[in-house]
Structures are given as structure tokens and as C-alpha cells.
Image (cartoon, rainbow, N blue to C red):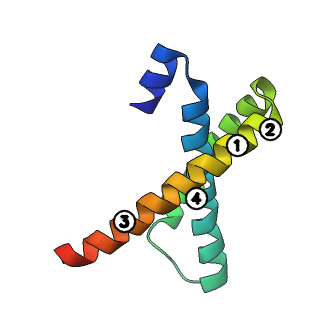
Amino acid sequence: MVNVLALTWQCYYLWIAIFTAFSFHIFIHIIQWVLIRKYIPVIVTSILSLPYLAWGSVRILEEFPLHAIMACFALGTIVAMVNLYFVHKYISQIE
């Protein structure tokens, strides 16, 4: 959906914000796996997404200024953290 909106409206900064926050999230899972030294359910999909993350990162770095990428990363990560907070807060009420 975000891809369609970014292409339709030519608003690529929204896509960069989500992509960089997703990339950060994936690397957090990989770090958890390395530190825990046990299988965690998300590790297979995290590792499988690395080629996509590498390709996307290269394309973004080629096309956009670094200050814009960093701003998108900061904003996307903040939004993702707030989202995760509320998801974890409200999922406990459902269970």
C-alpha cells in the first residue's frame, strides 16, 4: 500500500521512512538472535529480507541526500516505536 501511495503521489520520503524503520527493526531481531544464541521465530524471515534491505539501501543512497534519509529514518523509527508501544500495551488486554 505504501509503495502504491509513494508512486502515485511521488512522495518517496514516506516510503524511505517506513523502509528505514523496517530495516532497523530487522537488524534488532538479528542482534537479538546473536545475543540470545537460540532460534527465535523471526530470524528466518529477517535473514531472507537482507538482500532486499541491501538493494533498497543502495538505491536510496544513490537517489536521496543523506540528511533527508536520516530525517526519514528518525521520523519512521519514532512512529514505529510509538506503534509498537501501543500494540504491546493493547495486545495484553486482548489475551
Q: Residue at x 53, y 66 (%)?
A: 43
Residue 35's spot in the image, x, y percent?
Answer: 66, 82
Residue at numbered disc 2: 67
Q: Nearer the viewer, residue 86 or 58?
A: 86
User: Disc 4 on helix, strand or loop?
Assistant: helix
User: Disc 1 on helix, strand or loop?
Assistant: helix
User: Disc 3 on helix, strand or loop?
Assistant: helix
Give the quarter of the figure containing the C terminus: bottom left
Q: Earlier in the sequence, mark 3 or mark 1?
A: 1
Residue 83's spot in the image, x, y percent?
Answer: 42, 58
Q: Are marks 4 and 3 in contact (CB under 8 Å)?
A: no
Q: Residue at x 42, y 68 (%)?
A: 85
Q: Residue furthest left?
A: 94
Residue at numbered disc 3: 86
Q: Earlier in the sequence, mark 3 or mark 2?
A: 2
* Amino acid type indicated by mark 1: Ala
Q: Earlier in the sequence, mark 4 or mark 1?
A: 4
Q: Which mark is residue 26?
A: 4
Residue at numbered disc 1: 71
Tell me the mark number nearer the camera, choosing from 4 and 1. Answer: 1
Q: Are marks 3 and 1 in contact (CB under 8 Å)?
A: no
